[in-house]
Amino acid sequence: MSKITFLGGGSFGTALAVLLAEKNNIVNIYDRDKNVVNEINIKRTNGKYMKDLKIPSEVIAFDNVEEAIEGTDYVVLSVPSHVIRSMCKSLKGKISKNIPIISIAKGIEENSDKRLSNVIEEELDNPVVVLSGPSHAEEVSMKLPTTIVSTSKDMKYAADVQDLFMNSYFRIYTNDDIIGVEIGGAVKNIIALAAGVIDGLGYGDNTKAALLTRGMKEISRIGIALGGKAETFYGLTGMGDLIVTCTSMHSRNRKAGFLIGKGMSVDEALKEVGMVVEGVKACRAFYQLKEKINISMPITDGLYKGLFEGKDPKVIIDELMMRDKKNEIF
């Protein structure tokens, strides 16, 4: 039995909290929203993020970080990417340095271009483990077979986390390529947002297949340039995550893109989705990063112009189709 604290009561964090509680662990959830905290503790539900999920009594919610982390063995950062640094700052001096910090967010820090594990390491001296892969919270909560990846600079901790979470419906592989795992999980959100746009515009299967295939090229190109391994991008945190986020009705990135393709503004679409859409922040961050290191990412270019410069998506697609002739492999 272990004690695990989730910082953030969102959908994926809640689903994983229930999974761990059902494995006879003690689980705390911190959330700044007192309504979420009270609902978990009183009604044993979290309707804001996970409708119809019954939360067992082994999961206790707090609106105070210090109370939530008291005596914990693991801390799971289940907050959006842009909150990671401030959340880590709030932990300084409050937890032992041997407690692993598990990150389940996907993205990079805007302006600094740092991977989230680097952000955590800058603020805390704890070992960092990243969990990533094709894993919609809704399906995890339904106990549908799911496979993801555990990675760390020190793979002993990745293996510990593998044992902590793995059960009959939630299978975890280890992968020592922490760079590739994090970059794959971040960039696929850009492609998923673009996938939603083309669905909203009414394009077909041929277009979606082209987008996913060339999107994989962008993921692997930027990922390898940043130090990731090519094979990682054809695994769960590259191709696997790309498939699920580009095709699923559960994907908030695809949903936001779909609404934009249907004519909503970016702000209107984000308001309608009602949760953080990481692809928007990732698009801006990776557009700026690829400009600095001179990496070709035409889909990211096009999406950036549509999201932040107001360019007509159909014009963007025409321009992508009529670019100079190229060899597919290079």
Image (tube, helix red, strand yellow):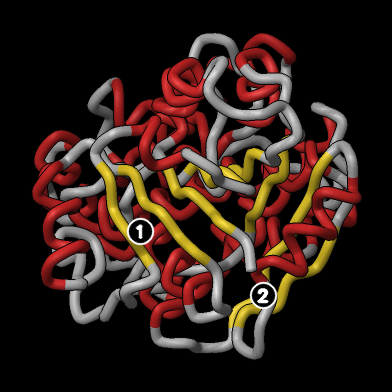
Nearest the viewer among 274 and 201 is: 274
**Image-based side of 252 in relation to 303, left or right:** left
Q: Is the residue 241 above or below the residue 43 in the image?
A: above
**Cβ atoms at labels 2 and 1 below 8 Å apart:** no
User: Which kind of residue does numbered mark 2 sit on?
Assistant: Thr
Tell me where residue 126 appears, x and y as whole percent: 72, 28
Q: For mark 1, does the 10 Å Cα neighbourhood hold few (<14), some (14 to 19), or many (20 or more) residues?
A: many
Q: Is the residue 109 above or below the residue 22 in the image?
A: above
The residue identified by callout 2 is 147
**Image-based side of 312 in relation to 239, left or right:** left
Residue at 57% in and 41% down: 186
**Residue at the far front in the pictured view:** 71
Residue at 28% in and 29% down: 311
Nearest the viewer among 320 and 78 is: 78
The residue identified by callout 1 is 254
Mark 2 vs mark 1: which is more N-terminal? 2
**Image-based side of 82 in relation to 269, left or right:** right
Residue at 54% in and 36% down: 107
Tell me where residue 4 appears, x and y as whole percent: 54, 54
Q: Is residue 208 visible?
A: no
Residue at 78% in and 64% down: 235
